[in-house]
Image (cartoon, rainbow, N blue to C red):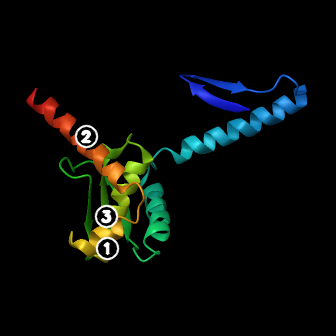
Amino acid sequence: MSAYRDGEKTIVMLPSSLSKAEEEYEIARILERLDGRERRSRPPTGDAGLMERAMELSHRYLDGEAVPSSVRWVGNQRSRWGSCTPEDRTIRISSMLRGMPVWVVDYILVHELAHLLEPSHNAAFWKLVDRYPKTERARGYLEGVTAARNLEATG
């Protein structure tokens, strides 16, 4: 049994041996799982969701020690993916990240959360950031996005 999205359609594959009642039950169960997977694969859209996600990541990768006072999306950062002010514990995430994979946004959140524990980009800071398992993948992704934007700007 499986399901996947094909554009606007959802394709569900079930064994033909199921009764009508079993089909309905399995379709509901599979669609619920698919919806859950898709929700987890998208970054939060609002500031409250972003703060909640930051706290989850702090607990998972930074022993819950990085506690921001606020985390919010901002539209005025064009040259940075995120920023942090350790003095007042605020984190700002560039709205340019909206629509990017959730693991990329998570990397930026972990990066900014790590600044709450270590303000500079020293070895201790990178050791904290590297606790996030997709750090290198996300950095490569963002380097590719930056390179593509630079090509567009000069082309």
Q: Residue at x 26, y 48 (%)?
A: 75
Residue behind mark 2:
144
Residue behind mark 3:
112
Q: How many marks?
A: 3
Extreme-left residue of the structure: 154
Dot 3 crowding, Cα within 10 Å, few <14, some 14–19, many 20+: many
Dot 2 crowding, Cα within 10 Å, few <14, some 14–19, many 20+: few
Callout 3–callout 1 Cβ contact below 8 Å: yes
Camera-nearest label, 2 or 3: 2
Rendering coords of residue 90 (x, y %) = 31, 68
Q: Secondary structure at mark 2?
A: helix
Q: Which comes before the other along the chain, label 1 or label 2?
A: 1
Rendering coords of residue 53 (x, y %) = 47, 59
Q: Nearer the viewer, residue 38 or 16?
A: 16
Question: Of the numbered discs in the image, which one, if any, rests on residue 91?
Answer: none
Residue 106 versus residue 17 in the image, above or below? below
Rendering coords of residue 67 (x, y %) = 41, 73
Q: Secondary structure at mark 1?
A: helix
**Three-letter amino acid code of the residue under disc 3:** Glu
Q: Which comes before the other along the chain, label 2 or label 3?
A: 3
Q: Quadrant of the N terminus?
A: top right
Occupied quadrant, residue 98: top left
Callout 2–callout 3 Cβ contact below 8 Å: no
Residue behind mark 1:
116
Q: Nearer the viewer, residue 28 or 48?
A: 28
Whole-number angstrom distance, CA of label 1 to CA of label 2: 27 Å
Q: Is residue 96 left or right of residue 33?
A: left
